[in-house]
Image: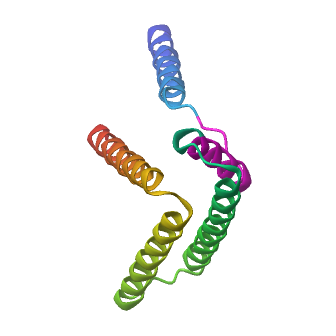
Amino acid sequence: MKKLIIAALLFVGIAGFAQEADQSAQPQRERLTPEQRNDRQLKKLTSELNLDANQQTQIKQLLADRSANAEKFREDRKNRKDSGTKLTTEQKAAFKQQMADEKTANDAKMKSILNDDQYKKWTAIKDENREKAKEKMKDRKDNN
């Protein structure tokens, strides 16, 4: 009986350590406010594209507008999820079209703000980041 109790306690202890190891393997990232994210992205773009003060001001406004739209979409999705309603096929298609239109408008605004060399570099950075995101998703999918 003693051996059984000791074995059970040992098993529970090992299982507890295994749980903690899994949780510490992926540390939680700090949650930034939209303004902090925009500032961080603006600093990164400024250093990578050598933006002047006027371009920084324009891009800061563009990033703020994008954040506001993203927050609105997040709220709408949360409200739909809370109410339990699902999008119809037509609504999904309209949403995808709206996102594509927004992306096109954002690219056009960036092209008007940046000079040709900066715009080429910005599109290259954007493509590179997209590839990195695809790799992360692939790795995450493979690990699950």
- Residue that appears at 73% across and 54% down: 35
Residue 111 position, x and y percent, is: 48, 65
Residue 51 in percent (x, y) is at 60, 48
Q: Is residue 88 above or below residue 64?
A: below
| Residue at image coords 57%, 42% | 50
Q: How many marks?
A: 0
**Camera-side residue of 136 and 10:** 136
Majority secondary structure of the magenta segment? helix
Q: How is the image coloured?
A: rainbow
Residue 5, placed above or below residue 60: above
Residue 116 x/y as whole percent? 43, 57
Q: Position of residue 53 (x, y in %)?
A: 71, 51
Q: In this view, does 18 lie to the left or right of 38?
A: left
The reply, left or right, for residue 124 in relation to residue 60 is: left
* Quarter of the rendering occupied by the C terminus: top left
Q: Image point 60% across, 67% down: which residue?
A: 66
What residue is shown at x 41% (from left), y 46% (from top)?
Answer: 125
Looking at this rendering, what residue extends furthest in the bottom direction?
90
User: Bounds of the magenta span?
Assistant: 28-46
In the image, 100: left or right of 12?
A: left
Query: Magenta span has 10?
Result: no
Relative side of 65 to 113, left or right: right
Q: Nearer the viewer, residue 141 or 115?
A: 115
